[in-house]
Amino acid sequence: MADSVSLDQFLAAAIDAAQKAGEVIRKGFYETKHVEHKGQVDLVTETDKRCEELVFNHLKQLFPNHKFIGEETTAANGVTELTDEPTWIVDPVDGTTNFVHGFPFVCVSIGLTIGKVPVVGVVFNPIMDELFTGAQGKGAFLNGKPIQVSTQSELVTALLLAEAGVKRDKATLDDATNRINSLLTKVRNIRIGGSCALDLCSVACGRADIFYELGFGGPWDVAAGVVIIREADPVKIWTSHH
């Protein structure tokens, strides 16, 4: 397990990397409006790859012995096995569909696991300029201010975040919408934001009370958010030894 000083160092490095990637996302976000449809898809994959490369290069210079798992590289090269080694798990652009449409729920997500436990998380939405951060035992923050999960205990007054998932076959969609339907009768209302990482952060800062998704994209969607949400829980219901 990392000591407190190195956790601070890892967190600071992740914030720097996220802000660098955020600049690229912000620039691309406002440019997409002027790109024709075919180009939009290309542009997104270019932005994805550029951001992932930027984040990994920044972190590799500082921590050459660490391991790296990214949505783009891993998707291209098959799944990388998670070991006990310090491993950075990165989603360079979470909310790609939002990015294409100019819907401002877009972020870069950077998580660090040590001994297979997520210990550092940074999620940055450069369009709304919101930086969510968390490190094990050190609390969770939004733009430097401490955040906490909501104290809502009743489903009937809860705001639920859900996602439709990535698959589009009829059986999966029916399953997802049926579940959402049955949940909708039990909660106050539902939101589908289109970014798993930002959904987790919304729960962490109390904007929403619950997040539910079946079959999310991969570890890069949750590696950072899970640290932030755990650190935002004042009761610390979860321990780091699941």
Image (spheres, rainbow, N blue to C red):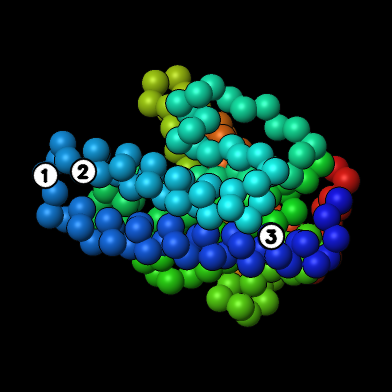
Q: Secondary structure at mark 2?
A: helix
Residues packed near mark 3 inside 10 Å, few (<14), some (14 to 19) or many (20 plus): many
- The quadrant where residue 137 appears: bottom right
* Residues under numbered marks 1 and 3 in contact, where contact means CB atoms less than 8 Å apart: no
Three-letter code for the amino acid on which mark 3 is drawn: Phe
The image shows residue 190 at horizontal and vertical percentages of 48, 53
> Around disc 2, counting alpha carbons within 10 Å, would you say few (fewer than 14), some (14 to 19), or many (20 or more)?
some
Q: Amino acid at mark 2?
A: Gln
Q: Is residue 209 left or right of residue 5?
A: left
Helix, strand or loop at label 1? It is loop
Q: Which residue shows up at 76% across the image and 62% down it? A: 7
Residue 157 locus on image (x, y percent): 60, 63
* Numbered label attached to residue 40: 2
Q: Are marks 1 and 2 in contact (CB under 8 Å)?
A: yes
Location of residue 135 in the rendering, given as x and y in whole percent from the top left corner:
73, 62
- Per the image, the residue denoted by label 1 is 36
206 w.r.t. 177: above or below: below
Q: Nearer the viewer, residue 204 or 24?
A: 24
**Mark 2 or 3: the one toward you:** 3
Percent x, y for residue 177? 46, 35
Considering the numbered disc 3 on the image, is that residue within a helix, a strand or a loop?
A: helix
Can residue 211 be seen here? The reply is no
Residue shown at 27%/48% (left/top)? 100
Q: Could you tell me how far apart the alpha carbons at marks 2 and 3 are, in whole angstroms?
A: 34 Å
Kindly identify which numbered label has been placed on residue 116: none
- First of labels 2, 3 by sequence position: 3
Which amino acid type is shown beneath numbered disc 1?
Answer: Glu
Q: Which residue is mark 3?
A: 10
